[in-house]
Image (cartoon, coloured by chain):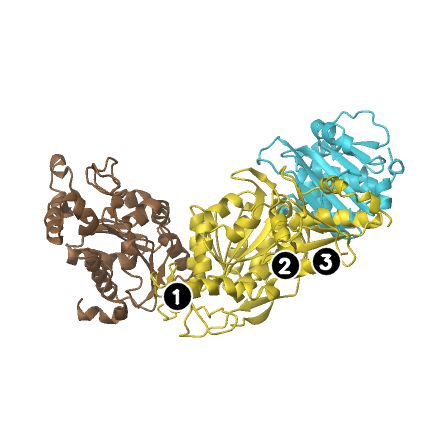
Amino acid sequence: MGPALLSIPQSAIRNPQWEILICGFGGQGVLFAGELLGRAGMRAGMEAAQSASYGAEARGSACHAGVVLSSEQIPYPKVRRPDLLMAMSQAGYDKFVPSVESGGTVIYDADLVKPKQIEGIGQVSVGATAAATELGRRGIANVVMVSAAVALTGIIPREALRQALEEQSPSAYLDVNLNALEAGWKMRES
Amino acid sequence: MSRELYPNLRLEVFPTPFCAGCGHGILLGAMVRAVNEAGLDWDRILFVSGIGCAAWIPSPHFAADTLHTTHGRPIAFGTGALLANPELKVVVISGDGDLAAIGGNHLIHAARRNLPLTVVCANNHVYGMTGGQVAPTTPIGDCTQTSPWGAEEPPFDLCRLVDGAGGGYVARHTVFQIWQLIRSLTRALKFDGFSFVEAVSPCPTHYGKLNEIPTLGDFHRRMRGLYIDRKRWDKLSESEREGKVPTGELISR
Amino acid sequence: MKPTIERVPSPIPPGEYFLLGDEASADGAVAAGCNFFAGYPITPASELMVRVVHRMKEFGGTFIQMEDEIGSISAMIGAAWAGARAMTATSGPGLSLMLEGIGYAAMTETPLVVVDIQRAGPSTGQATRPGSGDVFQVQFGSHSDYEIIALAPWSVQEIFDHTILAFNLSEAYRVPAFVMADESVGHLREKLTVPETVERWHRPARPGAPPFDTDDADGVPPMPAFGQGERLLVTGSTHDARGLRKTQDSEVHRRLVERLVGKIRRAADKITRWETYNTEDAELLFVAYGFSARAALDVVMELRRRGVRAGLFRPVTVWPFPERALIEAAAGAKDIVVPEMNWGQMTREVERVLHRPVVALPQVDGEGMRPETIWQGIREIDVVSREGT
């Protein structure tokens, strides 16, 4: 599937604002991914707000991060109806898919999510976990996912994403994270 | 009050509010002597106290910075002052109810941290200011307003408590052991770490009245039998120690 | 006594950051010159404390984790009198414990800053979920009469700015100052722009002057510190100008309490801050603060698009409450609606000020205020018929 299939959601035209939700479980770096996306938006000159579900800090429990990107001030900073859902777990997919804005997009990890047939939204499979495993570190699937989503939708220029990743990544993980960005970006062509 | 103490006191607030026979006045004098003995600068010393009769020993009598805090919290207040200005010598003087009951948690944590804080507990085994209620230090069997048939709960041994929590210097004396008390206070003030001195102080008004110890003299006689200097204590058998309390410099590490 | 205002280069490098509200507050504290932090772990304020640990190491301040919140506030007061700019961060349950020290700080006129990242209560409630139920607790939680200052940030930028402002106001008026954020702002990540320079207010020293009374019109005496040879008497009991306990003197007590309350009430017009959005011709006026105000603004903007004359009045200082400004903003409004994440606390204050019934829109489900809650609430106010008029 190529980018041509990804139409800009109606809500984004009416209101120059993107609502993005990333869901998964603790330990996958969902919050890191949310922060990265928000930071990249900010570096691209947009207004950005990122919120997250906070529970007991346990690995394996469901979690999600919301990102709002806009060319204008963001009055309400939480995600209500995502224009873009990035699903890294089946449970998260099942829970949040009904809230996706009509005309919106779902990008899911091919290894972790079995999609349902849903009218009115586009769904794209991304081999994030597979790509991360290939790079030798499953833990960077989150970066692959964000990179692929950014590439496929074109919300943020690549340079801004890279700058955000350089800022946010612990120095020991920077190289591997940059590889993940590269791998994710390539998925635009696949 | 000896004239040599005058420069370090706010004479305009005297006489003290302490009852006749109260031991806190003796501790007041001993403290001033110890500060001078230790060669401390009265402009660089902060006395912190909580709520209760003993809290009035430094505040307002001492001509130094004094901080009269909420009940049980002087050690926490003092910890903050010390950390903010390590040049200050911070000395907490308060009672057993203040330091061991409501403020017990702050006491053990300050001992654990072993910051150079000196804590002096005037222990009269009772809540004096509120009329004489049972304290966590009241010996079993002793009568107070709220233990009219004799205290039933075992009391804290404050020195062992502070020792167990990690305090570096621990000493105990009655106010009748005046020279030893001044010496231990002096050492405590100069100690580089957490120092704790328990000064056992008579309260004839509220404690003595209910336990047939009506005067200072009666307290003196009773305490002489109960509080045994460590040198003698070490030679006592287990059975001879029963019901008695060791005094002296107990810990210095 | 007027504070001197110093403008210093920001110790935090100027620029744009993508930070959590909690983290921005920690950086604001450093920018304000905070050099003492005593705290105790509590959700959702722990991120703030954790960042402060590193910031204090970097900028040379003192951090201590105390044995409980009573210890934290007590240590702060001791530190403030030893000359430090002291702060803590907590949430409802911790604030409940700190109230003893808040009363003491008010009585002894000790400047300090408490950042309250409010969560859903009562009691332990929902530790990770937002609430805004501390409105009355910060002002009236400790016994008897006193005044404090409380700011309610609604964004990451504002929690940074408010932390600085809280330090400055606290110094200027010698009162505890609160930054009353909530979990939704504390855990929100947004852009923070750190400016080139920041303002720091200082109380001018007046050696030898009594620290607890003044003839100055503002009623704020100068404040010396321990270790300066002033031989201070500081007490939470009723005291005279020098700090000497006067627990039987009714005149001293009356004068003291009157000044503690009066120094803030008289200066209310100078201290209070608020913002208005489309209130000039508003028939439907929302009064909201903190995170709830963002949901309210979202609704106001949509209502305006639909032709409804809606507006938002946002108290930036919750205490002192911006009474005069609210009366003005509400003059032409037919309906006043107060959405908040508690069961109508500010609603009472709004009713008291306006002497008229207002519509309370409480949302107490442990979620950040949702625009949907407000939409649902105003359905009954016949907003629809005003559309396009």
Closer to the camera, C155 or C286?
C286
Which residue position is annotated with label 1?
C252
| Residues marked 3 and 2 touching at CB (< 8 Å) | no
Q: Nearer the viewer, mark 3 or mark 2?
A: 3
Which percent across, then down, holds residue A82?
Answer: 77, 38
Which residue is pictured at 44% across the width and 46% down the height? C68
User: Is tag 3's residue or tag 1's residue first in the polypeptide sequence?
Assistant: 1
Query: Would you call the spot at circle 2 few (<14 residues within 10 Å), some (14-19), or many (20 or more)?
Result: many
Instruction: Identify the subunit bearing mark 1.
Output: C
Q: CA distance from mark 3 to mark 2?
A: 12 Å
Count the marks: how many? 3
- Residue C129 percent across, percent down from the top left: 60, 40
Q: Residues within 10 Å of mark 1 (few under 14, many from 20)?
A: some
Q: Earlier in the sequence, mark 2 or mark 1?
A: 1
Q: Which chain is cyan?
A: A
Name which residue lies at 11% across and 50% down: B218
| Chain at numbered mark 3 | C
Element marked by disc 1: helix
Chain B, which colour? brown
Residue receiving disc 2: C323
Asked whether the beta carbons under mark 2 and mark 1 sit within 8 Å of each other, the answer is: no
Q: Which chain does the residue under circle 2 lie in?
A: C
The residue tagged with tag 3: helix, strand or loop? loop
Amino acid under disc 2: Glu
Residue assigned mark 3: C331
Is residue A182 among the parts visible in the rendering? no
